[in-house]
Amino acid sequence: MGFDRNSDSLAVERELPANFTENDAARLVGPHPDLIGSSFPLSESQLAAIAPLLRLQPDTDRIAYFLEAQDDS
């Protein structure tokens, strides 16, 4: 998810591919016990690691990006 830095409104929402697992998310943001259901701000290097999976050209000057892990089961 990406939120406009000036208005805090949702600017972009993308789903990671199904092959991006909970373990992948943990490697990206760390092994948090509350990974599912939490929102994690992404650093520029973290965003760069997943941007190709999202087919996203990040605009970090305008948008703050977050990983939100959800349980779809």
Image (cartoon, rainbow, N blue to C red):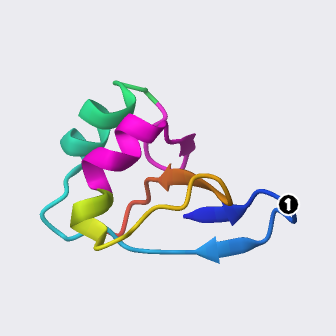
The image quadrant where one finds the C terminus is bottom left
Indicate yes or no whether the magenta region holds residue 23.
no
**Residue toward you, 70 or 43:** 43
Quadrant in the picture for residue 56: bottom left
Q: Residues within 10 Å of mark 1 (few under 14, many from 20)?
A: few
Quadrant in the picture for residue 59: bottom right
Identify the residue under disc 1: 6
Which percent across, then down, holds residue 46?
A: 37, 39
Give the secondary structure at mark 1. Answer: loop
Q: Tag 1: residue type?
A: Asn
**Residue toward you, 65 or 32:** 65
Which percent across, then down, holds residue 17?
A: 21, 70
Which percent across, then down, holds residue 8?
A: 82, 62
Q: Residue at x 85, y 60 (%)?
A: 6
In the rendered structure, the answer to whether residue 25 lies left or right of residue 44 reads left
The stretch in magenta equals 34-50
In the rendered structure, the answer to whether residue 59 lies left or right of residue 21 reads right
